[in-house]
Image (cartoon, rainbow, N blue to C red):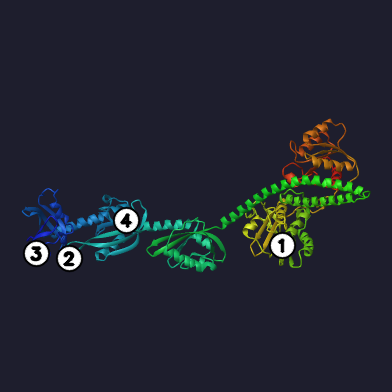
Amino acid sequence: MEDPPAALIGVDRDGTISLTAEVRSLLGYRDEELLGRSVATLVDLPSLFTDLLSDHSPTPEPLVVHTPFRRKDGTRFMADLHLSTVRSGTGTQVWAQLREAPLCDRVAVTRSLFRSLADSAGDAIISATLDGEITYWNPAAGRLYGYTAGEAIGQSLAMLYVVDPQREMAKVLAQVVEGRPAVLGRVQRRRKDGTVLRVSVTVAPILDTAGAIVGAASITTDTGGEQRAEARFQALLEAATVAIIGVNEAGRILLVNAEAERLFGYRRHELRDQPVEILVPQAVRGAHEGLRSGFLTHPKTRPMGVGLQLQAQRKDGSQFPVEVSLSAIDTDDGLLVAAAVRDLSQQAARERLEDQLQQTRRLDSLGQLAGGVAHDINNLMAIVGGHAAFIIDDAESGAAADGTGILADIAVQAHKIQGAVARTTDLTRQMLAFGNRGLLRKCVVEVNAAVRDSTTLLERTLGEHITIDQRLADDLWPIMADPGEIEQIIINAAVNARDAMPDGGRLTVETANTVQDADEASIPDLPPGRYVRLRVRDTGNGMTPETAAKAFEPFFTTKPPGQGTGLGLSTIYGIAVRHQGHARLDSQLGQGTTLTILLPAYQGPVGSDALPPKPAEADGARYTVLVVDDQDGVREVTRRFLLRDGHTVLEAAGGPAALELVAARTEPIDLLLTDVIMPGMLGTELARRVVADLPAVRVLFISGYAQPALNKQGTLGDDAILLEKPFTEHQLRTAVAATMSSAAT
């Protein structure tokens, strides 16, 4: 066999071809066409030449290499190169004698190249004979199936099949023998450890140099990995505690998770391909489309928790507050916007409960302050009112003999002082009611009857421009309450509503039964149980949220100076709390105000014991009374009142002094009249020790506070008799008679 034709080229140090001979038959160029061109015109690796000409390269021995060459027409062939360096007067050159490599060499190179590519491939590449014996197994196949090349080569392909291995393998190889590639798509294959994979397989024939089919080669891609990744993604998506919605650039919904179904009330298929505005309230859908377009133009991640609260709409049309985070994701199908939607309804409810709790605590603190102030005022009014009574008695008794009329005028002025004391007492009682410190005289109350009685009065006082509408529930539960305070709730609420409707309007009073469940309690600190709801609604001016939040605070008023005390609503709140109930105000500017009162329903028997006791009548008896009070003025007024009724009076400025007096006295003491809150010793402790020494003594407590507050402090028993300061001479006389007619304390 003759050697293939040879060509000669010479290459200078800069890679320029400077010598050619016999190149036309092999490369298609005339000799002169290549002169002056770069050797890169012919070969992809010009460094084969230039590296030999490097100053740092030693003069090598002749070098033989196999490398691809390009002909003039662009075709490629494998060439055998014999390279050597030649030195002459013009410099050093590389001469290359090249021939087209024989077929056997080309096959060897091709096989080497194939093996290199196959070994580095990421997919499993396997070759086998036509009877299924494995002849090649690349590293990726080892990673996929778990067999090493040494374990797999020589084995049958059938070991990888799952169902009827021999039959399935024979069917695939039969198709290959026919010269047709087999594209198997997604099929099952078995790993060495027995687990089953989902893979995509393509099988093609292997040809020899004569074109005959001698084997089969397959490329296997692990599609199960993608499926497992998809499954993991889907599982995470479905397990998410927030609603996730995927929206394309056209605003159409492509992706919905289970939480989104639950939150919005739609089934998945009802939302897919729908505009995302279906989940937005109708009133803002137009604006939302513009916002969505703006986001797609300049997508920017908006994380959850940025404080932007929005409204969403369910399938049934109901709306609820949400927080939304947005992320833009580039996909093969275009931009996808992932929206994570979190329902803020429960958070809003918690915030409302926290606000109610904070308001309750704030009002309780204000109540303590108001009660303390009222206590001090009551002590002062007891002194002022008592001395006014003394002045009136003295002035009126001498007025007839006084020709000047001065004493009569003094009596008139003293009566005015008593009137001011009475008005101040009413004011302090409202303060005590707000602070849960007023005296309660409870009995069974029918709220509907109280509403009817109060409405009769209100119709004459509110004016004809106010229409009163009663909506009273049948079979309303009774309550145990102070009837006067229930009427005060109705009257205060009605007067407040009248002031909010200067041009007239409608006042609606409603009653109903309601139950506070333990599991669904919406009002903090209100025990579960049955309640009577009293609701007063007006069509007046309403309030801003800021004003409504302060409406129950004492002395807060929106009226001009001199036109309101600011105690109307705070008194209502205090009465409700004192009766273990709750008061709530709902108002919107321009839409009126609704006042809701919840009072515990009474479930006991309705009999004579539920009625308030009748006051005792003074019997004219004379007693020895020990008066104990740390306020000198109060003690003096009390002493004078008692002396005027003929009693013997002993005095002490506190508990220790009173005990010394009792220990030193040999004559009996009939009545201990003592203040409750005193420095050094409480009145209850004094009473306990005095009664221990004198079992027959009766005890009458006096205080600027009232019995519920003192009971709450644990200083008075429920059966204790208490006279509230300030008191008149008649009230003291009646209280003494009632105490002396009662059983011993």
Q: Nearer the viewer, residue 288 or 96?
A: 288
Examine the image and state in which quarter residue 94 appears: bottom left
Examine the image and state in which quarter residue 657 appears: top right
- Checking the image for residue 283, the label placed there is none
User: Residue 441, how many percent across, how many down?
Assistant: 79, 51
Q: Earlier in the sequence, mark 3 or mark 4?
A: 3
Secondary structure at badge 4 equals helix
Name, please, the residue furthest toward the right.
401
Q: Quadrant of the C terminus?
A: top right
Q: Is residue 134 visible?
A: no
Calculate the distance from the C-alpha at mark 2 to the C-alpha at mark 4.
44 Å
Position of 334 relative to 375 (above/below): below
Identity of the amino acid at label 1? Asp
Calculate the distance from the C-alpha at mark 3 to the C-alpha at mark 4.
58 Å
Q: Nearer the viewer, residue 31 or 180?
A: 31
Closer to the eye: label 2 or 4: 2
Name, please, the residue furthest toward the left.
89
Identity of the amino acid at label 4? Leu
Secondary structure at badge 2 equals loop
- Checking the image for residue 160, the label placed there is 4
Calculate the distance from the C-alpha at mark 4 to the C-alpha at mark 1.
91 Å
Q: Earlier in the sequence, mark 2 or mark 3?
A: 3
Give the mark count: 4
User: Residue 21, how many percent across, how many down?
Assistant: 7, 61
Q: Earlier in the sequence, mark 2 or mark 1?
A: 2
Q: Which residue is mark 3?
A: 31
Q: Which residue is mark 1?
A: 499
Q: Which residue is mark 2?
A: 74
User: Residue 140, how many percent across, how many down?
Assistant: 29, 54
